[in-house]
Image (cartoon, grey):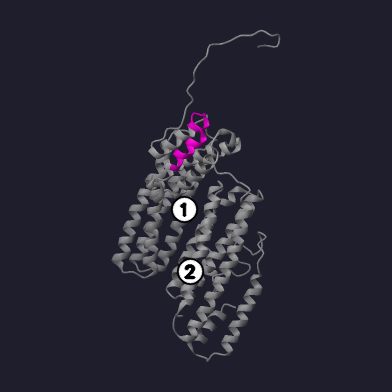
Amino acid sequence: EDFIGQKSKSKEIEILLPEKPFKNLIAISIINQRKNLSLNKEKPFEVGKVLAEIAASKFLEENLAVAKDWLLESSDILLESKDNSLLTSEKKSFVIDLLWKTALFVESGQLSIAENELRRAQQDLEEALSDGGNGAEIQEMINNLDNALAKYLDELEKPQEIDAPQVSESDDPGDRGGENGAQSNERENLEEKLEDIAELTASGSLDEAQDQLDEMQDISEGVDRDALGEAMGEQETDSQPMAMQQISEMMQEQEALMEDSFEQSLNAAQADQKTPGSGPANAGQKQETLRQQLEDVMHEISESDNPVPEELGRAERSMRQAQKELQRGRPDRAQVAQGRAIEQLKKAAEKMDKMHSGNGPSQMAGDSNGNSDRDSRDPLGRVPPGQGNSPGGDVGIIMESDNTKAKKIVKQLYKKAENSIKGSIERNYVDSLLDWY
């Protein structure tokens, strides 16, 4: 009807909007239920029951636990509303968005499985290098890592072949592949790292091979996080401050554990043996609990559609290494790994603070020189003042001054030195620590 009241009617034309094709049967089932919900073809309660049945899949339980959690979350919301009157538009929109993200994640499930296999292969090689395994064993681990890496990279390239997402229902989920040039460079970097590891282990340079393996893990984690993040439409939310507070608390807990390891090292040196009893085992259990807390924080950040700082992944691996060393009765080695974990947590908090303050998303891309200051750490694994890129307190983390803590430790060391016999194992160990200062 126009402004003078004239009316007209055109012929009805049906238009089929383009939609994203899915091949995975579970992903297709999720998308079908999403359509039933969004187009009101089924009652929300009925859709919730079907989603709960899909979540019970053994495949999801064993391979894609995150997708299972998302499905159960969607199902719980829908089951709470037995009729449409109890389902608000906000909740419905949230479930529709979450189901889209879940379907994308399941569709790329082979990539997730390949990533898990790559992580296991990396961990097996890391343990073999740490334990000083024989040449044949290490070579077998390298071959396994080579196969896992090839499968992972092949799966990483496949999502580029998928068409654009459904225009009518998506919120611009994006394309998974990323730029071909960048992905090609990352693949070359990963393959080069693997070649370096093989050459170093063949020459007996196991410590250097371990460093190369750490860098390889950082690169592979960054590649998959970027790809998956683009698929799910990364965006910043107000959950960042809460995560930063949790990271601050974990830093303080990790510092306390590192001081415990330091005391255990002194006691072990004084007794001329590794500390027996429940002490190291209890410390290892505390370290594992803290590592699991960090995993939970990383999971929460990922669920909030924020990019997970790669430094948190490095911190998690350092905590894992510290826990292993504590279980083996090596608190001296554990405290070095704990120091690395603290430093990476601090760097992650700084980047998250910059992101939340709007000082540059590019800061989340990672620090290509993240490990460059590893060799300049003190005996407790800390970066001395004036070095590194993460001065204490830059992100408003309330904690005791590093200088104050250092003075307390040095004072304890001097007391130990005064009460020890010159030339003894304990005195030599304490002197080596005091040489730093």
Q: With 114 as the anchor, is 100 left or right in this view?
A: right
Decide: few, some or many residues near mark 1? Use Cα within 10 Å; few <14, some 14-19, many ≥20.
Answer: some
User: Which region is colored magenta?
Assistant: 36-52
Instruction: Tell me the CA gap for discs 2 and 1.
Output: 26 Å
Considering every residue shown, the one lying at the far right of the view is 4
Q: Which mark is residue 285?
A: 2
Classify mark 2: helix, strand or loop. Answer: helix
Picture layout, residue 35 above or below residue 125? above
Quadrant of residue 133 within the rendered picture: bottom left
Q: Position of residue 435 (x, y in %)?
A: 56, 80
Picture layout, residue 403 above or below residue 353? below
Classify mark 1: helix, strand or loop. Answer: helix
Q: Position of residue 260 (x, y in %)?
A: 54, 75
Q: Which residue position holds label 1?
A: 221
Q: Most prominent secondary structure in the magenta stretch? A: helix
Disc nearer the start of the sequence (2/1): 1
Q: Quadrant of the C terminus?
A: bottom right
Q: Quadrant of the N terminus?
A: top right
Q: Position of residue 9 (x, y in %)?
A: 58, 10
Residue 176 counted in the magenta span? no
Foreground tag (2 vs 1): 2
Residue toward you, 124 or 189: 124
Residue 38 counted in the magenta span? yes
